[in-house]
Amino acid sequence: DSGVTQTPKHLITATGQRVTLRCSPRSGDLSVYWYQQSLDQGLQFLIQYYNGEERAKGNILERFSAQQFPDLHSELNLSSLELGDSALYFCASSVGTSLSTDTQYFGPGTRLTVL
Amino acid sequence: TQLLEQSPQFLSIQEGENLTVYCNSSSVFSSLQWYRQEPGEGPVLLVTVVTGGEVKKLKRLTFQFGDARKDSSLHITAAQPGDTGLYLCAGAQGAQKLVFGQGTRLTINP
């Protein structure tokens, strides 16, 4: 158990819909990261927040957005869903800000299926 | 085009054998991380290497960062069934970019 929690565990929805994935970081961690893992693209870094502010941006689509709240939990919003958005979405957290050297602890993931 | 190429993609060997997984790129990275992921779980960080030529050991696992910081290798000695999993390398470029290899799916047969 990494200490990072993600809800829901599974999500099934239809094309065109909007969903929200939730992440609670480990106690004391200020950074939250979001990743997408699919069979064809592998694991891709989407975005990082540190203490409520966007810190780094990866391959996040314009249809996707994220935020980190004052209690440090984070939400990833996916809208106008397409079949290709079906994937595992992971949240990770770390104490500091460095994408390069901080140890990131990954949650168990949310499996999104778009039908 | 994959920025980080991992090889092999699949590897199935017998318990007790040695193996090496490679992570190659034409780009320079400020650090290189190795993760192991088991089915139904998130990746777990094994090691981070930051200096060209650096070698780190974690029990039977040896990690090396290339001198030019463009490639890395993971060597496992006397593999055990518990080493089975998906091994991922990830290269960081500064504070804004982190890219992952496609992964090596390793199976150790008893």
Image (spheres, grey):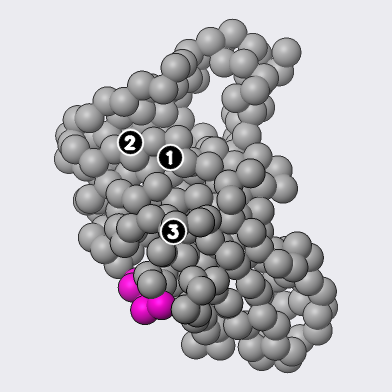
Q: Does any portion of residue A46 appear in the rendered image?
A: no
Residue nearer the viewer, A111 or A85: A111
Q: Which residue is mark 3?
A: A29
* Secondary structure predominantly adopted by residues drawn in magenta: strand
Three-letter residue code for mark 1: Trp
Residue A41 painted magenta: no
For residue A29, side relative to residue A5 (left or right): left
| Residue B62 falls in image quadrant | top left
Q: Residue at horizontal 47%, vertical 65%? A: A33
Q: CA distance from mark 2 to mark 3?
A: 29 Å
What residue appears at the point 29 percent right and 38 percent down from the top-left corner? B49
**Marks 2, 3 in one chain:** no
Q: Nearer the viewer, residue B19 or B33?
A: B33
Q: State the image coordinates of residue B107 (x, y, percent, origin top left).
A: 66, 27
Q: Is residue B55 above or below residue A80?
A: above
Q: Which residues are magenta?
A: A52-56
Q: Secondary structure at mark 3?
A: loop
Task: Report the Cα–Cα distance between label 2 and label 1.
Answer: 9 Å
Q: Which mark is residue B44?
A: none
When asked about the image quadrant of residue B9, the answer is top right
Residue at which label 1 appears: B34
Helix, strand or loop at mark 1 = strand
Q: Residue at x 70, y 88 (%)?
A: A18
Say which residue appears at 56% left-offset and 88% top-offset.
A63
> Which amino acid is tagged 3?
Asp
Instruction: Return the disc, 2 or 1, that comes first in the chain's sequence.
Output: 1
Query: Mark number for residue B72?
Result: 2
| Label 2 with label 1: CB-CB less than 8 Å | yes
Pointer 2 and pointer 3: residues touching (CB < 8 Å)?
A: no
